[in-house]
Image: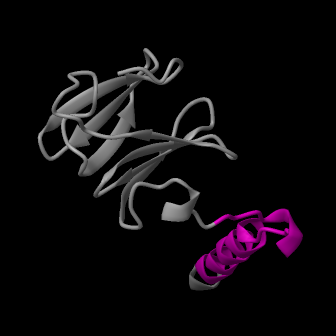
Amino acid sequence: MFRIQTYFFIFLLSLGYCFGQVDFKESDLVFSHLKVKDGLPDDETTCIYQDKRGYIWIGTTNGLSCYSGNRMLLFRHSAKDSLTIPDDFVLSIAEDSSNYLWIATNKGLSKINSITRKI
């Protein structure tokens, strides 16, 4: 009985090893470093979220950015405009089934339409 359990355990380990391997070339990976000079509001990132359409939303300590792959759209708080995020320190980003992004900041929540990108 012990021998069967040992072989079964070795079999499971080998399956995990075989199926756990990913075969790709380094040229398959594409990665860009985004910085303030690229349009980020700050170098200190607090959260990152990819929405259903593939846009990358980046929360920072100084605002929120939406990155399309070649263009950056910036969202910042303005005391003179009620249609801005409540604070520039973004804590987290989530998306609901109605295509709204929920942006949590130090001073409250914002709801952004992920299609129109309007608050």
Which part of the image, by quadrant, shows the C terminus?
top left
Q: Residue at x 69, y 46 (%)?
A: 70
Q: Position of residue 31 (x, y in %)?
A: 70, 64
Q: Position of residue 59 (x, y in %)?
A: 37, 50
Q: Image quarter for residue 17?
A: bottom right
Q: Residue at x 41, y 67 (%)?
A: 43
Residue 10 is covered by the magenta coloring: yes
Q: Residue at x 18, y 28 (%)?
A: 80
Residue 22 is covered by the magenta coloring: yes
Counting every numbered tag in the picture gives 0
Q: Which residues are magenta?
A: 4-32
Q: Is residue 63 above or below residue 104?
A: below
| Residue farthest along the front direction in this orientation | 80
Left or right of 29? Residue 70 is left
Whether residue 25 is visible to the viewer of this picture, yes or no, is no
| Residue farthest along the left direction in this orientation | 107
Q: Position of residue 1 (x, y in %)?
A: 58, 79
Left or right of 60? Residue 19 is right
What colour-coding does the image apply?
one colour
Left or right of 112? Residue 31 is right
Q: Residue at x 62, y 30 (%)?
A: 53
Q: Position of residue 54 (x, y in %)?
A: 63, 37
Whether residue 96 is visible to the viewer of this picture, yes or no, is yes
Q: Main secondary structure of the magenta part?
A: helix
Q: Image quarter for residue 19?
A: bottom right
Q: Is residue 106 above or below residue 29?
A: above
| Residue farthest along the top direction in this orientation | 98
Nearer-the-camera pick, 78 or 9: 78
Q: Is residue 50 above or below residue 3?
A: above
